[in-house]
Image (cartoon, rainbow, N blue to C red):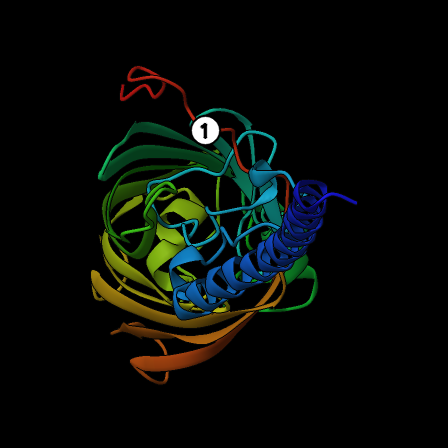
Amino acid sequence: MRPVLKISLLICILTFAMSAHGQKKYKKNKGTSKREIRKRQQKAYEQDKNTNAFNPIQPRGARQNDARDDLLWHHETANTVYPGAGNISITSPSRYSYKQGVELSSVLPLNYWVPNIAIKKRWANGAWHVASKHGLYSATPGFHWAKKRDFNSIVDSTAQIPFVLSMKNELIFSRYISKDNRCSREQPFVILTAGIGFDFGYAFGDSGLKEIEEHLLTNRSPALTGTGGTAFAKVRADWQINSQLMLGGGLKYFYGNFTGNHAFEQTTELQTFILSNLSLSIGYVLSYGKYNTPGSTVIYPLIDINWFFGKRQSRQKGLWGTKMF
């Protein structure tokens, strides 16, 4: 074999070997690069996971719209749940939204004694949320129930009980403080709320109902018995501690034609998520008022179980995707 052919053959062999080695090394580095990127993403998520509470990083193939991010908004705030979403609760109002910015609510177990329904309309949803809430309820079934069982502190055994229709009207303002969620939508972690309202009741027919001598009911007696009304003002704060704990509390002031004319209620509750859509709330309500009762201050425990259903709304597209009014 000629020297030129030998040299050419040697060059071809070396070129092929180097090319194969380079491809193998490239594939190895490519796989390593993917793993490193995934590790960095996971590390970043672990460091910043509280920022994504109720809107966590979704696994591959999951729909982003499945993540709920409205669970921090308490029923006392000015926001509404998403259309088709809501919650079912034991002692607090169960909620459902059939239309953007409109929410229906009712304390379901209470309907046996006091049938109740309320509608909340959100008028603005920028940094400031503004809503009005209007409700109808009647304590007439509860008065009949108490009369049969001789609960004289609620109704006298000889009292005539008419049909009483009561109404609630409330104006609510909420302001949220949010964290920087980078490319995702703003996620509030502190919500401040203030509101004013008025409860009024009307009795259809002769009535023998008197003021209820029980804390949490005396200050609501004018509306419940159909003898007048009670005005109230409230302030509240809700704080997202982390992705599974929320702390909320509020203070309400009542003024009306009941004994003492003035009353206060303070509530505090801690909510923890057992599952992504199931939570347990525990807390207390403290009632203060100079009623015709043995004590002016009483504290009651609060406990609630909440099941959340539905999905969050899709992201609004364009500058004019969200209506303010």
Q: Which residue is mark 1?
A: 315
Front-lying residue, 157 or 277: 277
Q: Which residue is located at x 40 percent, y 81 percent?
A: 299
Q: Is residue 242 visible?
A: yes
Above or below, 204 against 174 in this view is above
Quarter location, residue 218: bottom left
Q: Amino acid at mark 1?
A: Arg
Above or below, 304 against 175 in this view is below
Please rate how many residues cluster around mark 1, counting C-alpha atoms within 10 Å: few if below 14, some from 14 to 19, many from 20: few
Q: Quadrant of the N terminus?
A: top right
Q: Is residue 144 visible?
A: no
Q: Which residue is located at x 53 percent, y 46 percent?
A: 68
Residue 137 percent across, percent down from the top left: 51, 40
Residue 293 percent across, percent down from the top left: 36, 78
Q: Quadrant of the C terminus?
A: top left
Above or below, 96 against 216 in this view is above
Residue 267 percent across, percent down from the top left: 36, 69
Quick one: which residue is furthest to the right in this view? 1
Front-lying residue, 243 or 209: 243
Q: Which residue is located at x 27 percent, y 42 percent?
A: 197
Quick one: which residue is furthest to the front in this view? 2
Front-lying residue, 307 or 186: 186
